[in-house]
Amino acid sequence: MANIWNAWNREHYLGLVPWCWIELESAEPPGPFPFIGGVDPEVVASLHEAYSLMQSAIDTAISDVFAHRGPLDDPARRARLEDAYAEVVRSRPHLSAHIRCGRKPDGTFQWEYPHDPAKSATMRYGGLRVFNAVVRQAVPFGFDQTPSQTIGKFIGLLDGTHTAGELHASAEASVSAHAGTLTKFLEILNGIQALAASPRSSLHAHWLSATQDRDVIYLGHAALLYRQKDQFFLFDPWLMPWLAESPIPSLWGSLLPRPSAIFLTHDHDDHVDPRTLLTMPKDIPVIVPSRKNRRALYYDYPSILRELGFTRVIELAHGETFPFEGGGIASVPFFGEDPCDIEMPRNCYLVSDRGRNMLAHVDSGPTNAGRSALTEGVIERLVKDYGPIATVFASQQQLKELRTYAAHACLSPPGTWLEAGENGYLTNTYLAELATTAKARLFVSYATGGADWYPDHLSFTFSRRNPARTALLTANWEPPDALKDKLAPAGCGYHYAHALDIFRGTPDGGTTVVSTGETLFPLNLYRLDHGDPPFMKKR
Ligand SMILES: [Fe+2]
């Protein structure tokens, strides 16, 4: 049988084409909350089951309110929910083994479940699927005998910066059984036309020539690339493969310069995206929220990142810094976007580089109880310690959600499920105060899409493609644009970010938005080493 490794010139750089992607698949059915930590997964399963058994009754209660049969504010509703929940738990011994609940003689309701800081809902990947959006094919590949770390590491090498010879050597360096798996995997990739070879690997140099030291490059949604001298730091990469959601070539992992480190802010799919992370090199540090900041529950970043193949996970507790020459990146407390008050550790990040500061505030905002980075003096302290924060990147979403619809509802007291909670409720007043306290010169609205290649059906992404949907979604919002007038008195500008905007310092300490024209367009990035994609070439 022909050796697949001989299919390419050993000196040529081999990588995945941006219209192909890989998704890992779990070896066992995942529980309701993969990678949630601080509680035994069996307890979570019981909480989730009790919640599910309540759903039809809750839907009926909601319908009654909309049908004007029940009042919006019904003082008896909470107790009714609690009693119905307790009845469900009492009737099923496997639920009452994990959940202690019931009405006490004094009328108060008890609802408790055991925490266990050492337990988390880890998951193992046992297979993957390779997708090719152009030929519209998906091929499964099982690798039960090979750890997903080995696969993840190998996928990370397929970023077009390694030659076929280097990749071969890397596969051969694995245990022989795993080397065989990697060779088979390569055959699958080749069979679905997912690979492209080139005598050049010029992306990194191109990004360096198109950007300047201390630039912030916006990559869409909440993804930011910070250039520090000749290295790049990547924040919250949620990127799209070409043609995955829209017909436009998008920024994808293999089109970026190699990051020196990745920073993750919080446990939401649009900020921690395994599909994107899989494309990244696995030998770089990934900086994540720390379990030191947990109240009870946490998201187990080290476990998921280890499964993907990363080997250097750094839990950065609030106030700690990831240093680099001339400055560092500080972990800043993240508040809110937490309708059920679960309070898992989350980070915002402050980049402080040779006297110039930038804050990735992401979706942080006031909690249900009104606590925020402002009320807790966090922003004030940052300015005192680091100086004015020239550019503040923050979401302008204004979402409230019935707790029963929130992802983690089952982990919160059942009596509160028909109350609304904030799910990232950033009013213009809050954001103007944030920018003013930060002494910001430019407020950048981001993390609500920001590129035409994102899915257009999510509650937090907006697209020019569907204005009527936006009108429905934002019917009761304060106009986001009106923030401009609230920022002006403080000398702070406003900008709604579009992918590939570059934010650059001005001599007076301000921030200007620069366009690189077409130099960083995804299609042009691909063309650098490969010319036109085959599906665009004339027949
Ligand atoms: Fe979020």
Image (tube, rainbow, N blue to C red):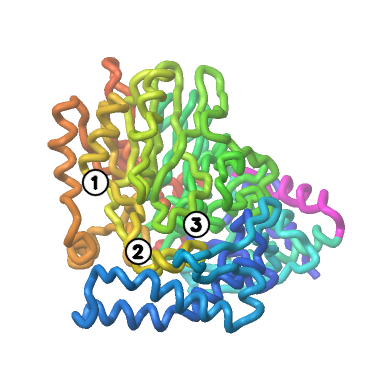
Q: Residue at x 19, y 80 (%)?
A: 68
Indicate the amino acid at tag 1: Thr
Which of the two marks, 1 or 3, is nearer to us in this view?
1
Is residue 134 within the magenta segment?
Answer: no
Instruction: Left or right? Give the position of 249 relative to 432.
Output: right
In the drawing, what numbered circle is on residue 106? Answer: none
In the drawing, what numbered circle is on residue 427? Answer: 1
Q: Earlier in the sequence, mark 3 or mark 2?
A: 3
In the drawing, what numbered circle is on residue 458? Answer: 2
What is the quadrant of the C terminus in the image? bottom left
Highlighted range, magenta: 161-176
In the drawing, what numbered circle is on residue 18? Answer: 3
Q: Main secondary structure of the magenta part?
A: helix
Toward the viewer: 230 or 306? 306
Seen in the picture, residue 336 relative to 511 is either above or below; the reply is below
Q: Earlier in the sequence, mark 1 or mark 3?
A: 3
